[in-house]
Amino acid sequence: MQKHILILGGGFGGLAAANELRSNLSADVKITVIDKKDYFMMDLVKLWIIKGTRKFETSKRPLQTITKKGIEFVNEQVVAIDPKQRKVKTASGEFSCDFLIIAMGVELGPEKIPGLNGNCLVLYDLEDGPKIRNEILKIKSGKIAFAITGMPYKCPPAPFEAALIIDSMLKGQKVREEIEIDFYSPAPITLPAAGPEVSKQLLDILEQQNIKFHGNCKTILVEKNQLKFEDGTSAKFDLLIAIPPHRAPKTVYECGLAQEGAYIPVKRDCKTGYDKVYAIGDVTTMMVTDKIAVPKAGIFAEGQGIAVARDIISQIKKGQDAPIFDGRGGCFVEMGNTAGYVYVDMFADPNPITRLDKPTQEHLVEKEKFEKERLEKWL
Ligand SMILES: Cc1cc2nc3c(=O)[nH]c(=O)nc-3n(C[C@H](O)[C@H](O)[C@H](O)COP(=O)(O)OP(=O)(O)OC[C@H]3O[C@@H](n4cnc5c(N)ncnc54)[C@H](O)[C@@H]3O)c2cc1C
């Protein structure tokens, strides 16, 4: 009987897995991707929308394109998952499969912080990108606050990149000296998963640009022009750019794959505990030590997607390999016309290795290549 591999989510991890599978399995194995969106756009483009070098309309790619490669695409919302039976329901259909890969990413939950909705622009929200740009182009003086309001969040360097990009825009507009930029995070250091040394290097970069980092600031309430923190302190702002708390999609809790408020726990093989059911990317928690988890980033979702695809290929072809996620990757830290690069090897023995390469124009070119190469390969 024809084998069927079903992938929930056509984002970073889902597309990487689907392409690896399709390139290595014959056409008699059916591969289906289900996504509620009909397009893919890398999240990093959201920063370029703020910068003004990109538009959403010209950066998104139709997911339907994958059908040309022999990958089926269903543009529907997943409403129920039965991991035991490997069955999935959408609004209009039911799917069963031999292998199930859950790659549904995270959702934003601004309502978890009272007052956040309505008093901020959301850095990770597609619609708020052009609004943030407009505000930055208009602002002449005052105080811009960035607030990370929940941990973990996607792409740990991204909010700092946004602060550095905005710093550079304001300098170009010759108003930077009239504007304060403050950054509030519940974490004590800038990039906890990258460790104290890299965090200090990033802190130095922020301080050189007069961006003030305030650690251990857990936002509990937002009022008009004011953030309130758990320790009783508060901070004023004229413009708040926030990263709301994240959560796994509801269907993931409802089927019991994750507890409410948490993500699907996996080890390096990305197995969920249900036979032939895998979870990859942002929807998972993969612990590295008892305190540090693999960060939520596209590069890791991609690595996990490829590892899982290779495991499935090995099972279908009756091979002996049991590939696991290698934990290596990196994220660019864009700042104006240059970018740094944070490299991590999460499972290096005996401790994770992290490094921040100094900002260069070459890294910015590599960041653009990072997007281009994947779009060409996947879609
Ligand atoms: C501003 C910003 C900059 C970033 N920059 C970088 C970077 O430079 N490098 C990097 O590696 N990472 C970066 N990231 C992080 C990266 O985008 C994510 O970590 C990555 O997309 C995670 O991949 P994923 O496959 O787990 O989830 P996603 O890519 O989010 O894909 C999940 C998919 O599942 C679909 N889905 C969810 N629920 C349902 C449902 N019920 N039914 C059907 N479909 C559903 C969604 O529509 C989505 O397409 C950045 C993130 C942001 C916000």
Image (tube, rainbow, N blue to C red):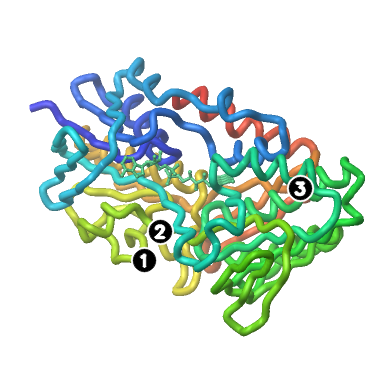
C-alpha separation, residue under disc 2 versus residue under disc 3: 27 Å
| Quadrant of the snapshot with the C terminus | top left
Residue 247: mark in rendering:
2
Tell me whether the residue at label 2 lies in contact with that at label 1, contact meaning CB atoms closer than 8 angstroms. Answer: yes
Residue on which disc 3 sits:
166
The disc, 1 or 3, on the residue closer to the chain's N-terminal end is: 3
Estimate how packed mark 2 is, as few (under 14), some (14 to 19) or many (20 or more) residues with alpha carbons within 10 Å: many
Q: What element carries label 2?
A: strand
Residue on which disc 1 sits:
261
Q: Which of 135 and 49 is in front in this view?
A: 135
Q: Which residue is drawn at 45% across and 65% down?
A: 112
| Quadrant of the snapshot with the N terminus | top left
Tell me whether the residue at label 2 lies in contact with that at label 3, contact meaning CB atoms closer than 8 angstroms. Answer: no
What x and y, as percent, mark residue 142?
Answer: 82, 59
Q: Which of 44 and 139 is in front in this view?
A: 139
Q: What residue type is labelled 2?
A: Arg
